Amino acid sequence: MRTSRLFAYLQLTRPANVVTAIADIWAGFAISGTWVYILTGGQGSNELILKLAWLSLSTIGLYAGGVAFNDVFDAELDAVERPERPIPSGRASKSGAAWMSFLLLLGGVLAAAQVNLVSAGIACAVACLAVLYDYWGKHQNLLGPVNMGLCRSGNLLLGVSVVPSLFTTYWIFGMIPLVFVAAITMISRGEVHGKNRNALYGGLSMYVLVVVVIAAMPIMHDTPILEVIPFLALLSYMIFPPLIKAIRSQDPKLIGKSVKAAVISLIIVNASIAAAFAGWKIGIIVLLLLPISLWLAKKFAVT
C-alpha cells in the first residue's frame, strides 16, 4: 500500500518530463562553453562538474514541483476529465501533493544557490513562473503558452548561468525553448476535446521556425552544419509526422500522441543546440538522456 502511494506521488512529478528539463541545463552548459572545458580536463573542471550536478538537481526540483502543483490546482477539473489521475482517484492527497510541490520548488532554488546568485535568481523566477502558469497562465489563450515557454527559457538560461558574465550575451537563445514549448502548449489544448485545427497549424509553423533557427546557429557560431543536421533530422522525424496526423484527423488521442512526442523531443532540441555550439560529441551526450526519458514515458504519464 505504501509503495502504491509513493508511486502515485511520483506520477505527479512526470518523471519522463523531468529528464527533458535536465537536457535544458546540459544544453545551457554547451552554450556557455563549459562542456568543452570539462571534457578537455581544464583547471577547475571538477568544480564545474559539481556545478553541473547542482544545476541538474535544481531543475529536477523546479520541474517536478511545477508540474505537481498543476495537478493540485486542477484537482476538481481532473475529477471530471481525468479521474484516473493520482489526486482525484484518492491515491494521493491534495494537501500532501501541495506540500511536496512546495518543497521541490524550494529545493530547486536552494540547489541553484550553491552555484551562484545569478543561478539562484533564475531558479526563483522559474519557480514563480511555474506556479503562475499552474494557477493562472494555463487559462489564458495568448499569455498561457508564453508563460509556459518562459519557464523553459529560464531553465535553459539556468544552465548558461554557470558562467554569469555570459548571461547578458546569450539570453536571446532562451527564445528557442520559449517558441517550442509555447507551440506544445497551444497544441495540447485540443488533447481533451479535439477540434482545434487553428492551434495545430499555429504549432506546426512554430515548430518549423525552431528547426530553421537551430539550422542557422552553426553558421553564426562557426560550427560545421553537418554536425547539427542529423539531430535536426531526428527532431523533424519525431515531431512532424504525429502532428500532421493530428491535424488531419482532429482526434484527441492523436493530438495527445503528438504532444507526448514533442515533450520528449525537447531533449533532441537541446541536443541540437548543444551540437551547434560545441559539436556533435556534446550533442550525443545530451541525446543520451532520450532513451531514459522514453523508458520512463512507458511507465508514467507525460501529459
Image: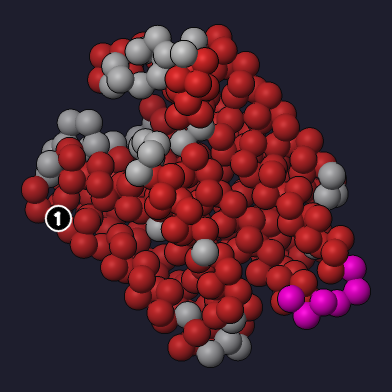
Between residues 32 and 99, which one lies in front from this camera angle? 99
Question: Which residue position holds label 1?
Answer: 245
At 76% from the left edge and 48% from the top edge, which residue is drawn? 54
**Coloring scheme of the render?**
secondary structure
Between residues 281 and 244, which one lies in front from this camera angle? 281
Between residues 117 and 258, which one lies in front from this camera angle? 258
Q: Residues within 10 Å of mark 1 (few under 14, many from 20)?
A: some
Q: Position of residue 14 (x, y in %)?
A: 46, 36
Q: Position of residue 66 (x, y in %)?
A: 55, 32
Q: Which residues are magenta?
A: 39-44
Between residues 233 and 85, which one lies in front from this camera angle? 85
At 34% from the left edge and 61% from the top edge, which residue is drawn? 207
Q: Position of residue 79 (x, y in %)?
A: 31, 13
At 45% from the left edge and 29% from the top edge, which residue is drawn? 11
At 40% from the left edge and 36% from the top edge, which residue is drawn? 300
The image shows residue 149, relative to residue 85, as above or below, that is below
Q: Position of residue 288 (x, y in %)?
A: 52, 64
Going by the image, does 151 lie left or right of 83?
right
> Residue reaching furthest left?
249
Q: Quadrant of the C terminus?
A: top left
Q: Say whether residue 249 is magenta.
A: no
Going by the image, does 268 lie left or right of 283?
left
Residue 179 appears in the figure: no
Amino acid at circle 1: Lys
The image shows residue 301, relative to residue 211, as above or below, that is above
In which image quadrant can residue 42 be found? bottom right
Q: What is the magenta segment's predominant secondary structure? A: loop
Residue 95 appears in the figure: yes
Determine whether the residue tagged by mark 1 lies in a helix, strand or loop: helix
